[in-house]
Image (cartoon, rainbow, N blue to C red):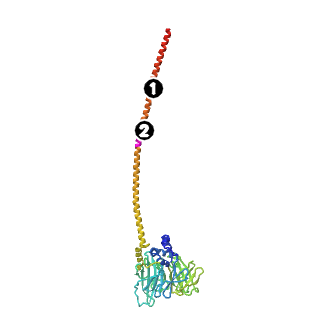
Amino acid sequence: MDPQPAEDLNLPADIIRNILTRLPAKFLMQFRCVSKRWGAVIDSPEFIKEHLNRSVATGANLHLILGGESGNYYSAKVASLDCVVQLNAEFDARFTLWGSCNGLLLLARSRDEIFLFNPSTRKYKKLPNPLIPDPGYLESTFICYGFGYDPVCDDYKVFLLMEFRDGDDEWIKSETRVYSLKSNSWKCLRDFPYSLPYRRVNCVHVKGAVHMVVAFGRENLPLGREIVAFDLRTEEYRTVPKPDYEEKNWVGMTTDVLDGCLCLTVIYCEYRVDMWVMKEYGVKESWVKLVTLAPPMVEDYATLAPIAYSTDGKEVLLNHKGIMLIWYDLEKKTVRKASVRGLSRFYCAGTCVGSLVPFDSDGETANRKKQWEQEGKFGDIKKQQGEEGKICEIKKQLGQEGKVDEIIKQQGEEAKIGEIKKQQGQGGKISEIKKQQGEEGKIGEIKKLQGQEGKISEIKKQQGQEGKIGEIKKQREEENQCEEEEEEEEEVEV
């Protein structure tokens, strides 16, 4: 069954983004073609930085980079070393791997052939000529390359130091340059205040600075070594405290980096080597002796360097003489040879985290930004227009809703006014009723009074009638009395 388009998966954009940040860079390069939306997201600077930070923090995308005899470069997972993949970088000759930072490699063969290479994207950039004059009469040249990242300026920089000596190996002059990827140009620095103790000095990037072992003064003396850091932001030098290594019988030392920590490898004349790790940067007391090797474990320690820890952290992968890899068991203090399937011989080795970091100075990011502006940062123009149409529709609806709200508000106010008027009308009616009731009350009172007066009149009438009756009774009594008196008189006469 064909996979559904991302839009049909109904997954929130932040969940899709979170999933993508966990994938290897090589898969993300393929997923850029899924849709314009995915391509824009994966190419965005915010996503590239988020993916890089997760890869560095987890170590899941850490790769071993090997330079083959033919000039090609190969990549293998540090965790397994089971097979290698050719990176298809078409360099016509061998280049020395000088360092890596955030997925970018610094490769150089001469001062006018310096490249930055991203093995995950297969893209590389040739740096402009640093324009260091070549004094032909000098016998030897000591050289040091450093490569790192300035987080304050968000810029990748290359540090180049060349020291010229005469036939007696006496210091004559030095030239120091710093390249900025952001400006795509070199800058000349003031005179280097130290001298290089070896023809090739390893320079590693830790905490925004490149670190190297130097000698005091202008003479290549066996004593007086220091660790010097060149700050990529301030472009100033400073010393870093050394571990308490044995001062006696040492013949060489070099800086390395292991799991983001500064390392110092000290080689002694009896072919013993100690590897120190600074667990807390800048703190002298944090130096820990991690590895001690002595014959017959390995015959030659001149170019022994740490590469990476194993997945379980119990072993350290070491680069021996640039042509052999060995595992050192930190608990058992034993070594075993590490073989890389598919590659029998190589001439340089290093590590690199998989990333999508571009070369900003070549206009690639600017072109992508222009494309985002044309296509819409999170979709194509049609989708953007559709979204804008939806927005306009929403605004229209909101406008209509605003009008409706206004109408409702007006209606509400009118309703309130009507209610008030109604109440006022009712109040008028009530007043009228009350007035009527008052009048009716008065009428009732009058009627009541009239009724009472009627009763009084009736009573008076009755009383008048009773008075007449009393008069009649009185007259009758008087008449009866007169009749009785007449009868008595008649009887007397008789």
Q: Does 68 sit left or right of 392 as displayed?
A: right
Q: Position of residue 114 (x, y in %)?
A: 44, 84
Give residue 236's position: percent from left, percent from top: 43, 78
Residue under numbered circle 2 = 441
For label 2, the crowd category at 10 Å Cα-Cα, with few meaning under 14, some 14 to 19 and many 20 or more, is some
The one nearer the camera, 488 or 407, is: 488
Q: Residue 115 carries which label?
A: none
Task: State the residue at coordinates (41%, 67%).
Answer: 391
Which secondary structure is most common in the magenta stretch?
A: helix
User: Residues under labels 1 and 2: Cα distance?
Assistant: 31 Å
Residue drawn at x 45%, y 19% as measured from the top left? 475
Where disc 2 sits, the SS reads helix
- Return the residue nearer the eye: 117 or 400: 400
Three-letter code for the amino acid on which mark 1 is drawn: Gln
Amino acid tagged 2: Gly
What residue is disc 1 on?
463
Magenta part of the chain:
432-436
Give the percent coordinates (x, y) of residue 148: 46, 79
In this view, the mark in front (1 or 2): 1
- Residue 17 showing in the rendered view: no
Q: Which residue is drawn at 40% across and 50% down?
A: 420
When the figure is inspected, residue 475 is found, relative to residue 78, above or below; the finding is: above
User: Camera-side residue: 1 or 383?
Assistant: 1
Q: Tell whether position 433 is magenta.
A: yes
Q: Closer to the N terminus: mark 1 or mark 2?
A: 2
Res 470 visible: yes
Q: Does the magenta stretch include residue 10?
A: no
Figure quadrant of residue 441: top left
